């Protein structure tokens, strides 16, 4: 046991403890994923887990998880402390909420915060969140016009008090979902993973003879903050601006950004972006900050752990009432349609200062499939299925390598196995393969999108939900690279399903989904001839594209 009676912990011991914190939260996240009921959590990892000090500052996050969940969770524990001051918390208390403005940006992510006690003293918090497939509200995710239409809204509440579950609150949750077993099961999964994390944190405290995390917390935070500042200090000072146009719904959406690298850190401001809309892809500021911070992290300081200290020098603002700082009660269930596009917007600014490290634009938004059926009229409660399958497009090419194909970048959510999707429904995925020629041509090629074809295995219609981008405005190439291929959704009958919203797939018909390809970087004629030949052999490009775009004659 480490002797900490004289307070000063050696630097080596601090590093060992820091690594232990990372192990604690990774086990916490893995427990959540293994015990989750929702396929998007269990199969695709749409979750976050972290450990915080007694002040509510994030010390470590799990690798398993997504930036939108993790970086917004970094703020969520502070909201819990504001609602329930630490001096009122008891051992065995657990808090729950899904407030979009204090959580991850929409109601379908439930957040759990657990104060962790050691020998009667509050030493920190374990927090987690994950996507819940159904939390009530409208089945047509494109039709909501305020947050109250989107499902059960839980303010910060005590779901467990000194070890006793609030069964009344559990009954409310159970009664407000079309999937009561799955939804309540996911809530217990989140509660359990926090408890496992707390148990492991207490084990660490005992092993090292710690009575508090304060000294270790200051080391983690200050070391990380200083590392980020050192990275930023080596970059050119200045401001760079960019804009991006997205499909939107009734009208295109223009987003603008200004990135400034200054002495005190990096500033990103979204002034000039489109105002709030009546549709449900308005984005609370917490989610805007989450994906903006991620873009800064992966492009400028990707080797520095993500915590309160490393996040501190990132200053992210958007005018109140714009689409990236939507105010309650805006409809926000599809906030990812804007949020997941922000890394490309930030990259377009940074590329002007750092052209040798920033990728071209990619697919961005996940092309998730949400199927509900059988859709005979009227559907009977308890006799329908609702399943979600994560699908992805291509990543933009970097200035030194090709973009990855069919990847969840920048979300971090993995594509789900179609076998699981099929086992929980009557829908069959008849085809799922890379879409030839979808990656933008360049010295380095954009990643490929996918083409998927699904239909019902029984003579019944079913419904799919479309919440996509990059159909009207494909990913743009960089430094002479070509645009990626735009996405497309249609029926096998030829009918277009490109409009956001819910669409019926008639009995006997199939839905055909083509996710976008990433854009290319650099002149296609400068692409290595061996790389063009390999693309041709692998079926990534057609002979016509090899000849016409790359000048390849074999």
Image: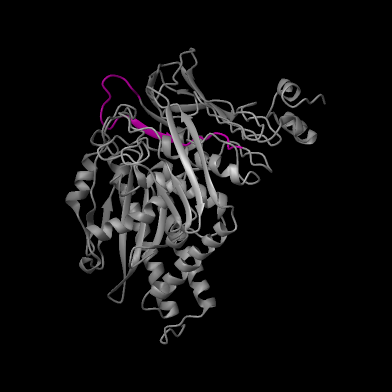
Q: Can residue 78 be spotted in the picture?
A: yes
Q: Is residue 415 visible?
A: no
The image's colouring method is one colour
Position in image of residue 517 (x %, y %): 58, 31
- Residue at the outermost front position: 238
Determine the image quadrant of residue 152: top left
Where is residue 13 drawn, in percent x and y? 51, 77
Pick the front one: 153 or 431: 153
Drawn side of residue 158 relative to residue 503, left or right = left
Q: In this view, does 329 lie above or below 307?
A: above
Residue 385 counted in the magenta span: yes
Residue sitting nearer the eye, 187 or 278:
278
In the figure, 186 relative to 373: above or below? below
Q: Is residue 231 above or below residue 253?
A: below
Q: x, y (%) of residue 144? A: 28, 29
**Magenta region: which residues?**
374-396
């Amino acid at each position: 046991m480490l002797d900490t009676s004289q307070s000063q912990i050696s630097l080596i011991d601090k590093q060992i403890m820091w690594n232990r914190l990372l192990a604690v939260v990774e086990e916490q996240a893995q427990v959540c994923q293994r015990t989750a009921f929702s396929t998007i959590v269990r199969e695709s990892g749409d979750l976050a887990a972290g450990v915080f000090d007694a002040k509510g500052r994030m010390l470590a996050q799990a690798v398993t998880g997504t930036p939108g969940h993790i970086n917004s969770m970094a703020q969520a524990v502070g909201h819990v402390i504001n609602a329930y001051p630490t001096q009122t918390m008891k051992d065995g208390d657990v808090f729950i909420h899904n407030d979009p403005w204090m959580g991850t940006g929409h109601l379908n992510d439930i957040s759990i915060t657990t104060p962790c006690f050691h020998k009667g003293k509050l030493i920190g918090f374990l927090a987690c969140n994950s996507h819940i497939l159904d939390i009530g509200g409208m089945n047509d995710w494109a039709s909501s016009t305020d947050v109250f239409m989107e499902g059960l809204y839980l303010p910060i509440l005590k779901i467990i008090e000194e070890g006793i579950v609030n069964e009344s609150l559990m009954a409310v949750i159970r009664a407000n979902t079309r999937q009561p077993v799955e939804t309540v099961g996911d809530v217990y999964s989140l509660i359990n993973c926090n408890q496992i994390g707390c148990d492991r944190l207490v084990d660490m405290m005992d092993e090292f003879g710690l009575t508090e995390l304060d000294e270790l917390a200051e080391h983690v935070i200050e070391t990380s903050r200083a590392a980020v500042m050192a990275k930023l200090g080596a970059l050119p000072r200045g401001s760079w601006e960019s804009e991006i146009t997205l499909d939107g719904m009734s009208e295109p959406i223009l987003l603008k950004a200004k990135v400034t690298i200054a002495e005190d850190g990096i500033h990103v401001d979204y002034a000039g972006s489109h105002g709030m809309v009546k549709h449900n892809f308005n984005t609370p500021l917490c989610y805007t900050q989450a994906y903006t911070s991620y873009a800064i992290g992966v492009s400028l300081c990707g080797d520095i752990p993500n915590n309160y200290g490393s996040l501190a020098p990132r200053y992210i603002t958007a005018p109140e009432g714009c689409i990236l700082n939507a105010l309650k009660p805006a409809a926000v269930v599809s906030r990812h349609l804007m949020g997941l596009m922000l890394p490309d917007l930030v990259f377009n600014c940074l590329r002007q200062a750092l052209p040798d490290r920033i990728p071209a634009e990619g697919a961005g938004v996940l092309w998730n499939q949400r199927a509900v059926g059988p859709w005979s009229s009227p559907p009977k409660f308890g006799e329908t299925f609702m399943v979600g399958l994560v699908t992805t497009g291509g990543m933009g090419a970097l200035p030194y390598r090709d973009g990855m194909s069919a990847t969840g970048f920048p979300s971090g959510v993995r594509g789900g196995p179609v076998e699981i999707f099929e086992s929980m429904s009557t829908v069959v995925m008849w085809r799922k393969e890379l879409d030839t020629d979808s990656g933008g041509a360049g010295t380095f090629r954009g990643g490929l999108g996918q083409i998927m074809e699904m239909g019902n295995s029984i003579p019944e219609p079913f419904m799919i939900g479309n919440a996509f981008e990059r159909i009207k405005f494909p990913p743009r190439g960089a430094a002479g690279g070509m645009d990626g291929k735009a996405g497309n959704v249609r029926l096998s009958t030829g009918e277009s399903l490109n409009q956001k919203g819910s669409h019926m797939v008639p009995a006997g018909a199939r839905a055909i989904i083509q996710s976008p390809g990433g854009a290319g970087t650099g002149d296609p004629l400068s692409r290595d001839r061996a790389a063009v030949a390999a693309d041709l052999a692998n079926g990534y490009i057609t002979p016509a594209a090899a000849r016409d775009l790359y000048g390849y004659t074999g």
